[in-house]
Image: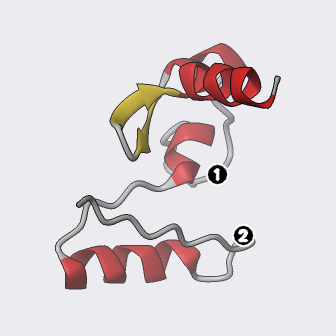
Amino acid sequence: MKRCIHVIGAAGSGATSLGRALAAALALPHHDADDDLWLPTVLPYRTLREAAERLRRPVLHVDGLRPLSELVADVCATLG
């Protein structure tokens, strides 16, 4: 059985720090949603990724890594 913990919080709330600490303590992979939204820069969180690139980036899902666009399409199909 795969284990997954989602930690959600506002910017600056410590969600990333808590997520990293939990991942390390429980030997689980860590994925930060900020990595999908922002380009790596010297001063972080200054330059957004292009929307098309964000949709192509793989995201963690219970079935493994899949592009976000596929997950959105699956959810929309399920909801009708």
Q: Eyeballing the image, is 61 above or below 52?
A: below
Q: Quadrant of the N terminus?
A: bottom left
Task: Using the image as rendered, state which of residue 46 and residue 27 is in the foreground.
Answer: 27
Q: How many C-alpha atoms fall within 10 Å of the one at disc 2: few (<14), some, or many (≥20)? A: few
Q: Which residue is disc 2 drawn over?
A: 11
Amino acid under disc 1: Tyr
Which secondary structure lies at badge 1?
A: loop
Task: Using the image as rendered, state which of residue 63 and residue 44 is in the foreground.
Answer: 63
Badge 2 or badge 1: first in the primary sequence: 2
Q: Eyeballing the image, is 38 above or below 52?
A: below
Q: Are marks 2 and 1 in contact (CB under 8 Å)?
A: yes
The mark found on residue 45 in the picture is: 1
Residue 44 in picture, x, y percent from top left: 57, 54
Q: Eyeballing the image, is 62 above or below 12?
A: above
Amino acid under disc 2: Ala
Residue at 70 percent across and 28 percent down: it is 78
Q: Nearer the viewer, mark 2 or mark 1?
A: 2
Residue 11 in picture, x, y percent from top left: 72, 69
Q: Is residue 30 visible?
A: yes
> Gap between marks 2 and 1, in whole Å?
10 Å
Residue 6 in picture, x, y percent from top left: 52, 67
